[in-house]
Amino acid sequence: MEINNDRFNDEPFAVGECGWFQRQKLAWWFRLAIWIIKLGPIPRHVAFIMDGNRRYARAHNCSDVLEGHELGFKQLTKVLDWCDYVGIQEVTLYAFSIENFKRSESEVKGLMELAEIKFTRLLDLLQKSEESASHKVCIRFFGDLQLLPEKIRSLITQIEAITRNKGSTFLNICLAYTSSNELFRAVEGAKQKIQSDQHDKTSEYGCIVDECMDTYKCLPLDMVVRTSERRLSDFMLMRLREFTYLHFEENVLWPEFSLWHLLKSIIAFQISRFELIKMRANISPNKNQFYKFYELFKLASCD
């Protein structure tokens, strides 16, 4: 079989100099590794907890921890590109937790300024490419957005409006977010729906709450990847399922997260998926080993 190089030469984004969606030219061994991995099931929805920017800045004697966040953003643009190469349909990012507001005033202010700069550049890119439809990503923002500065909220509204009906690939950015806060706001939203008689009267209360959650329309969460530590930090807890694979890179800081780390996590996901399916599959012991593997492969598919 031949490797389809057209897939790796395709550029779905109008890159420019905005710093978002930067298309990279991969070495042949990376393209070969991706081609092999794509023979197995690929997670459709992957969430990233991008931890370790401050530690990276301190370990590399940066003058300010904000330099670590800037390096973390640069690495994020690469990771998004790698996810596109691999064929991941939806990516969710834990960009800023509500708990992060407890950090120093200077750091929080710096992060808000950095977010404003990046979102302004992203909006400029989207507006320039809107007529040609060269951007194919629907960008959504989750969290208690009222906690953010007004300028950032305005940028978020415009970005979501431009990309609302673009393509079948999704980028979810969680800002001022925790799962407990998401659940609290969903319960309040469900109460208002019931009180105003705007709900489906055949629906149970739990279903109404679920429909009010930020992440309601997300694909099932296949994999969570966390760098630097081994915890979930109140992230996407309502979307975890029995088949969700949790991958921790405890000794890797986010700016160090490489394509090899991503491919390693996908291989681990594939092994986990096959093991789960093997436990649940009811396959006749009389069938030969090749046919058993073929059935397992079909069952493990994420499509």
Image (cartoon, rainbow, N blue to C red):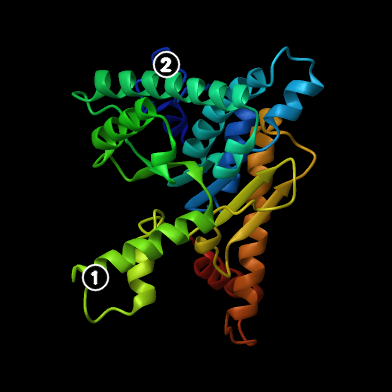
Q: Nearer the viewer, mark 1 or mark 2?
A: 1
Judge by depth and name the residue closer to the eye, 191 or 229: 191
Judge by depth and name the residue closer to the eye, 161 or 187: 187
Residue 88 appears in view? no
Query: Where does the image place residue 239, in percent across and percent down from the top left?
Result: 50, 61
Instruction: Name the residue located 57 percent from the left edge and 67 percent from the top edge.
Output: 243
Q: Are marks 1 and 2 in contact (CB under 8 Å)?
A: no
Query: Where does the image place residue 96, in percent across and percent down from the top left?
Result: 54, 38
Query: Where does the image place residue 29, in percent across and percent down from the top left?
Result: 65, 31
Q: Secondary structure at mark 1?
A: helix
Residue 270 appears in view? yes
Horizontal arrangement in the rendering, residue 10 relative to residue 43 (left or right) = left
Amino acid type, label 2: Cys
Q: Residues within 10 Å of mark 2 (few under 14, many from 20)?
A: some
Instruction: Name the residue located 68 percent from the left edge and 52 percent from the top edge.
Output: 247
Query: Where does the image place residue 94, in percent across and percent down from the top left?
Result: 55, 42
Q: Which residue is mark 2?
A: 18
Location of residue 161 by image quarter: top left
Q: Which residue is mark 1?
A: 195
